[in-house]
Structure formats: C-alpha cells, structure tokens
Image (cartoon, rainbow, N blue to C red):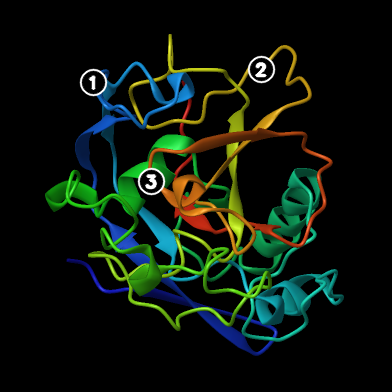
Amino acid sequence: MNNPYLETVNGHTFRMIFVEGGAFDMGSADDDPEAYDSEKPRHRVTLPDFYMGEYPVTQALWKAVMGSNPSQFVGDDRPVEQVTWDDTQGFFRWLNAVTESTRHADHLYRLPSEAEWEYAARGGKYHADCFKYAGSDRLKDVGWYTENSDQETKPVGQKSPNQLGLYDLSGNVMEWCEDDGHDDYKDAPTNGSAWIDHLNRGSARLCRGGSCSTTARYCCIARRVIAAPINRVYSLGFRLVLAPHLKK
C-alpha cells in the first residue's frame, strides 16, 4: 500500500489514505431481505486509485480553511457539521486554492463519488464484501449511532478503523457525496465517477454512512440517503477525496 499523503493548511496537518483502485460489486444483492430498492440493482464498478481523508473533515480543518465554525457540537477533533452541500463546494474552492503548490499535480480535493465512498468503506480492492459496516459486523466497534452516541457527535478516531485505516465511515456524521440524488442504480456510472445530471443538477444529493442520530440500519455500507443540498443539520458532514477529475 502506498504511504499516506499529508497536507498542511494554515498550520493544521491532515492525512489522506491511499486507496488502490479495483473492481467491486456496488449495492445490495437482490435476495438481501434487509436491502432497500434504492440499493439496487447491484452492479460492477471499476475505479482508479484515489486518496481519501482518514477522518471526516474536522472542525479544526474547517476553521483552518474557512476561519469560522458552524458546528453545533463544538470541538476541534469532532467532525464539522451543519454544513450544506453548497458549503462544501466553497470549502473545496478555498482548499484547492491554498494547496495549489503542494498537492499532487493534476489532482484536486473534492467530495467522494458514491462509488468511491462505498468502495473505500468496504475496504477497497481486497476486502470488498467483508462486513456489514465499515470495518466490522458489530457497529459499536466502529461507529457512533443512536445506541451509544447520546445523540451527539464524538471526536474522530475513537472507534476502530476499517481495513484501509479509515475511521468513522459508519456513524458519527452522515457524509455528503458528489452525486445527484437518484432513486436507484439503474444507468449508474460503472467507472467510479459521480452520477451528475449536468444539464440540471436538481434539488437532491446523496449522503452515506449514517450518523450519531440514526439507527444501525442507516449505518450499513450500502445504505443511501437523498437530501436537499441546502440541508444543514448537526448529523451531516463530509470527507475529502484527492484524485484526478473523473467524468461519466
């Protein structure tokens, strides 16, 4: 596995974990009795390499880039929350501007595509079908959800990581993805790119991972949630990807 990539912005250093590309079956099987229709049809996706944030974006990183903190549950090591999808785009504009001379050539920071998020949550190339949650079949080992969170976010990295060394993918905060909202996977891209309706982006985006305010079912790797890009709630944050731009 390649070494993690470290970036420093205004004195704050964060870590990006290398995710080797590969192929996996995205979504839930047709015979899964717990699966929602939105998680089907299961389809083969092949992705190139990318880097993903070790943790959800923390309040310390958000403040280093944006200078303010919108979060309800304040703490530098807690995930930033109460950020809309549109807010994340402003964050990435600033982050890419201030790292222009330091980040990998031809790479940009951005939200993960749904496919990148699910592939990484499943453990990447070598662990694509191991667990129900990101790193374990026991959610309490890897995530904060309604039964153990007291309905508030927690500092990142307190639970066990998944096989790639990524923390808090199941629970703590639900995470924005780049994709527009689609009710199922019919006609979804198979190259790992975000599924974007370029002519009319519409009023829906995708979120993944469950949160401190959701039940275990929402923290399953395959679970998808559609939300308006203007949603601003304490249980919704995001995670970084560093990669070349992908097109459908």
Q: Which residue is mark 1?
A: 31
Q: Which residue is mark 2?
A: 198
| Res. 116 image quadrant | top left
Q: Residue at x 46, y 33 (%)?
A: 246
Identity of the amino acid at label 1? Asp
Residue 175 versus residue 118 in the image, above or below: below
| Front disc: 3 or 1 | 1
Q: Secondary structure at mark 3?
A: loop
**First in sequence: mark 2 or mark 1?**
1
Dot 2: element: loop
Q: Could you tell me which residue is drawn at 47 percent across and 37 percent down? A: 114
Q: Horizontal and vertical percent for residue 92?
A: 69, 55
Left or right: residue 232 versus residue 180 is right
Task: Please name the amino acid that badge 2 sits on.
Answer: His
Residue most toward the bottom? 11
Q: Earlier in the sequence, mark 3 or mark 2?
A: 2
Measured as percent of width and height from the top left, residue 105 is found at 45, 56
Q: Amino acid at mark 3?
A: Ile
Q: Quadrant of residue 178?
A: top right
Q: Which one is nearer the viewer's eye here, 107 or 174?
A: 174
Where residue 27 sits, quadrant-wise, is: top left
The residue carrying mark 3 is 221
Q: Does residue 206 lie above or below 214 as drawn?
A: above
The N terminus, quarter of image: bottom left
* Residue nearest the observer in this picture, 245 or 177: 177
User: Which x, y percent locates residue 161?
Assistant: 33, 72
